[in-house]
Image (tube, grey):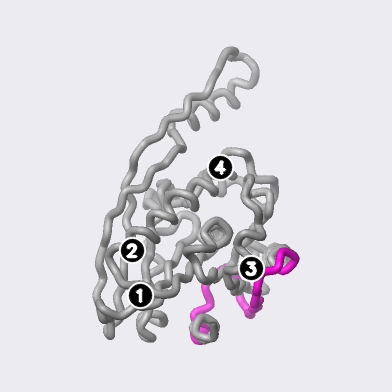
Amino acid sequence: MNIIIKLKPKPTQILISFLLLFNFAQAQNDSIENISVLWNKVEAYTSTIVVLPDIYESTKAHTLVIGLHGYGATAKSLLSLSKPFTDVGFIYASPEAPYPVIHWDKTLGYEWFLYDLPRLNLLERPATKIEKAAMRLTTEQMMGQVISDLKKKYKIGKIYIAGMSQGGIITYLSGIHYPEKIDGMIIFGSVVMEDWLGNDDIEDGKTVRSLIIHGNKDEAVPIKYAEDSRDLLLEHGYDVIFKEFDGGHTVPMHLMDFVIDWINKE
């Protein structure tokens, strides 16, 4: 098994100074007037770890699975998901989310878009305009770039994105944003809502196969949200398989054979 760490450029538009202004203005309530927001476009680098199968052949088109980690995790944290895929000859890629998060123990993790998870669960309130913009930005710029860069370096056939939790949100949006590039999306412990899409039509992505896997004891994202997401996709004509398992907010490794069979049944 070969592990290749690959750096790629990714443009971002979420400015730290904007967040500082936003939070400062909130803290001051209405005591400060004439505050404006300046949006700057900055360039950043983020890594994608690529794991090749032992039977990798550079002249042969391999199925690609892109694994997206959850909030506060890292690209390395989802490498445990690679083996079931590489064992059957797939290429596995694990990108790292763009925004850093400092944990209580001072370790560093990453998130796909900016929201205040430590104090407030995203699902307990509507997503803000900034969160929605960050979600779309990640899919429209970063995921498109990841796919483009991987296809330049490797001979790739079908492309599947598998996301856990917050990474699952980006998986949903990637499938809807890029139906011409993505063949299927695999969702673990996550949710999607139609108003997160901006002006994009949710039916644009209905050619993308969808597998939703969710634990019936998930307290971080209760299974009702997964069921609602399934029903939303079905309502708009998606091909959806829904798989419930006895467990919590995790990737069920015991179901990976089921996932691979689902990929191969196309």
Residue 90 is inside the magenta segment: no
Q: Are marks 2 and 1 in contact (CB under 8 Å)?
A: yes
Q: Nearer the viewer, mark 1 or mark 3?
A: 1
The three-letter code of the residue at mark 2 reads Leu
Give the residue displayed 65% in from the left and 74% down from the top.
Answer: 239
Q: Earlier in the sequence, mark 4 or mark 1?
A: 1
Give the residue displayed 42% in from the left and 41% down from the top.
Answer: 12
**Residue 238: x, y in percent?**
66, 69
Q: Is residue 255 above or below residue 223?
A: below
**Circle 3 crowding by C-alpha within 10 Å: few under 14, some 14–19, many from 20:** some
Query: What distance separates the C-alpha of mark 1 from that of mark 3?
Result: 29 Å
Query: What distance separates the C-alpha of mark 2 from that of mark 3?
Result: 33 Å
Query: What distance separates the C-alpha of mark 2 from that of mark 1?
Result: 10 Å
**Circle 4 crowding by C-alpha within 10 Å: few under 14, some 14–19, many from 20:** some
Residue 146 located left or right of residue 204? left
Give the residue displayed 46% in from the left and 62% down from the top.
Answer: 69
Residue at the spot of label 4:
133
Give the residue displayed 54% in from the left and 28% down from the top.
Answer: 22
Q: Are marks 1 and 3 in contact (CB under 8 Å)?
A: no
The three-letter code of the residue at mark 3 reads Asp
Q: Nearer the viewer, mark 4 or mark 2?
A: 2
Q: Earlier in the sequence, mark 3 or mark 4?
A: 4
Residue 218: give its label. 3
Disc 2 is placed on an element classified as helix
Residue 150: give its label. 2
Residues in magenta? 234-258
